[in-house]
Amino acid sequence: SQLCAQGLSPDIATYSAAISACDRAAHWRGALQLLRDVEADHLQPDLITYTAALSSFAGAREWARSLMLWHEISVQKCLETTHSSFNAIASAQAVPGQWHRVIGLLLQMFSKDLMPSTSMYNTLVAGFGEELCWERSLALLRPMRTHGPQPDSLFYGALIAQCERSWQWTQALQLAANA
């Protein structure tokens, strides 16, 4: 890598921080290159490193690349996924036409006895909003109310907005009254 060529010996924490910086700068290509540099420098990427790279794909809507990396993390590397990694991949998949994948991720979380976070549900409802799938978003309320976490104001706001855009005024008013 360039750092090694300059006589520096970065560790995995340094690479993870650099990949996170690429994410914040909306530079997914740089994050991907740094991830490959980790391997070229014979370091073992950890889940923090991979999650940072997944997050960089989310902002760029690089859902296909995020799927390849998710496969690498969960199948090839056999790393134990966490709430953060699930949220990162869900955000990367949050593009029109890919919502079946996000639902699949939600089911994977349940199968691993991981309770989806409010952030995960907010990602889902935001994505369904892009496709005006207010019924799907409304269906998320049942597991949230039964198992948690409780919906927050972002969730309710996005769901109410979806109902309004879909001309579901009665539903929007009911949600507003119960939020």
Image (tube, helix red, strand yellow):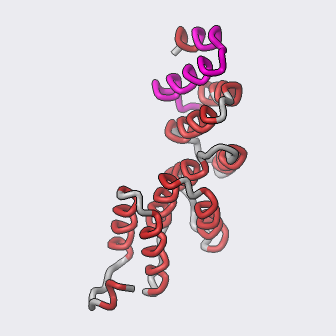
Q: Which residue corresponds to the image point at 50% horizontal and 23% vertical from the top-left?
A: 157
Picture coordinates of residue 85 (x, y %)? 52, 56
- Who is closer to the viewer here, 161 or 19? 161
Identify whether 70 is placed above or below 110.
below
Relative side of 12 to 90, left or right? left
Picture coordinates of residue 91 (x, y %)? 54, 48
* Residue 154 in sight: yes
Q: Which residue corresponds to the image point at 65% horizontal and 66% vertical from the top-left?
A: 71
Indicate the quadrant where residue 1 lies: bottom left
The extreme left residue here reads 7
Within the magenta stretch, is there residue 142? no
* Residue 107 in sight: no
Relative side of 152 to 79, left or right? left
In magenta, the rendered stretch is: 148-174
Picture coordinates of residue 150 (x, y %)? 52, 27
- Who is closer to the viewer here, 48 or 80? 48
Q: How many marks?
A: 0
- Who is closer to the viewer here, 138 or 29? 29
Identify whether 125 is placed above or below 165.
below
Within the magenta stretch, is there residue 157? yes
Indicate the quadrant where residue 165 lies: top right
Q: Which residue corresponds to the image point at 60% horizontal and 64% vertical from the top-left?
A: 65
Picture coordinates of residue 83 (x, y %)? 52, 50
Q: Which residue corresponds to the image point at 59% horizontal and 33% vertical from the top-left?
A: 125
Identify whether 75 is placed above or below 135.
below
- Who is closer to the viewer here, 50 or 172? 172
Q: Magenta residues: mostly which secondary structure? A: helix
Relative side of 8 to 77, left or right? left
